Image (cartoon, rainbow, N blue to C red):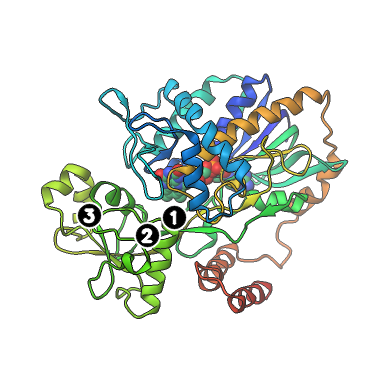
Amino acid sequence: MHVETDVLIIGSGGAGMYAAIEAARAGCSVFMAERSLIGRGGATVMAQMTVAAALGEETPDHWSFHLNDTLEAGRGLCDERLARLLCEDGPVRIREMEDWGIGWARKHGRIAQAFAPGHDRPRCVYVDFLNTGPAVSKTLRGVVTRAKAIRKASDLLVVELVRAGGEVAGAVAWHVATGAPVTIAAKATIVAAGGLTRLYRRNSASANMGGDGYALALRAGAPLVDMEFVQFFPIGHLAPRLIGMDPIMWDPFRYKLGGRLLNSAGEEFAARYGVSEDGRYVITRDLATYAIAKEVEAGRGSPHGGAYLSFQHCSEAELRAAFGPVIDRLARNNIDLTRMPVEVAPIAHYHMGGIVADEGMATELLGLFVAGEAVGGANGANRLSGNAITEALVFGARAGRSAGERVERMPTHAFRPEAARETLDLLAGGADGNDINTAAAIQRLQAIMADDVGPFRTEAGLARALAEDGE
Ligand SMILES: Cc1cc2nc3c(=O)[nH]c(=O)nc-3n(C[C@H](O)[C@H](O)[C@H](O)COP(=O)(O)OP(=O)(O)OC[C@H]3O[C@@H](n4cnc5c(N)ncnc54)[C@H](O)[C@@H]3O)c2cc1C
């Protein structure tokens, strides 16, 4: 099958859908290829909690204050141009989502803004603390569905970008359900394929977040930046066994109820690392990850190699008022938070690095744009809570607009079938006796990444990882 479109969008999370909407607004035909289900394959639909933007609804605020916090959280390593765009454009996107009917939570008639660690004031909007991502995704899916210029293809895995005369001219994809190859000619291509945290053994990712976007861009010749900056979510669930619940579910608990992060001696140890929590939730993700790993290293970890998180200071009534049915689900897992702490430990959660982009989300390769978590640099070495959804919406809109501007200047498609031939041959190759067991390969890679490319990276560990990967 061969498809022709003005704009090809790879991935349909928050970034991909916003880019599609904006490109369609610019008068382009859009083809959105998604390896899973449209709007349901990646991190956006899984996000639970909050979205950061300096709306100034609860407390006076300005995007420059948000930028200061973003730069500080990023440990001075942010790409300041991109960080600024994230903070400056954020409020516009959040209000547009409100116009599209997302229904941000309100207090006294104004959009509610919660305080989150690393922000200097209440800045994070939400729908509710467990369903913000699904609401973002549903709202964008609605707008996408109403835009007649946007064609959507689920189950379509993009495997290679196609170049013509040094520019990106489209892609080759593989239809997951039938195995059929698909070529796509596009005047502009936007990578919005999300992050890579599935490459780690313990992660908060879906099966579709394996770094495809970075690989596509890199193989086509677009540079990447900060690939070593993986954000570990410090309080991923570790023990006891918890079935049917999200491993990062303790974050909303901490937002609402504080909670105490304790070592095996029952000490609230964050103070040892420079942050006095005292039952509040103020420690940033990188510092909490560091602190937990150091406590474990010092022999003060919990039995399964993490820390304890305790809500024993809360009564059953308080827990139920905050989380209602979730408390019943915990009870079905034999967890009674009034009587016991749970064990938590860092899990791979978000990727700060990614594809190098300018303010228009153009990569260094003509014809190729990028949006969302696939973009590198805006968050430096550590992302603030709530900045990722904002980034997806802001960078998505910008990428869609820039793609539209390129399309206006391009009378015809540059795509030539010969340029796709090698990839098509590879797809048609089938079994040649050298097939690898991909499930086993992914497990092996996850183990290498977890053991040697985790929060504490050393030269020896990285060398070991490279050597093992090459075997
Ligand atoms: C569990 C969880 C909770 C989170 N909570 C929050 C939060 O509360 N607040 C916040 O700001 N951020 C949060 N984040 C981070 C945030 O959700 C993401 O950074 C953001 O949604 C990324 O949006 P995106 O559109 O760039 O990527 P995604 O939403 O991940 O979408 C990428 C899409 O690309 C598709 N894709 C991948 N490869 C291909 C391919 N080769 N071909 C075709 N399609 C492909 C995927 O299937 C997916 O649908 C959370 C992340 C997780 C995992």
Helix, strand or loop at disc 1? loop
Give the spatial CA distance, label 2 vs label 3. Answer: 15 Å
- In this rendering, the label closer to the viewer, 2 or 3: 2
The amino acid marked with disc number 2 is: Gly
The amino acid marked with disc number 1 is: Ser
Residue wearing tag 2:
236
**Which residue does the image show at 46% across and 33% down from the upper left?**
62
Give the spatial CA distance, label 1 vs label 3. Answer: 19 Å
User: 457 above or below 312?
Assistant: below
Q: Position of residue 23 (x, y in %)?
A: 64, 26
Q: Position of residue 302 (x, y in %)?
A: 30, 73
Residue wearing tag 1:
204
Tell me, yes or no, if residue 330 can be seen here.
Answer: yes
Q: Position of residue 276 (x, y in %)?
A: 30, 60
Residue wearing tag 3:
330
First along the sequence among labels 1 and 3: 1
Looking at the image, do the residues carrying marks 1 and 3 touch, with CB atoms under 8 Å apart? no
- Comparing 341 with 415, the one in front is 341
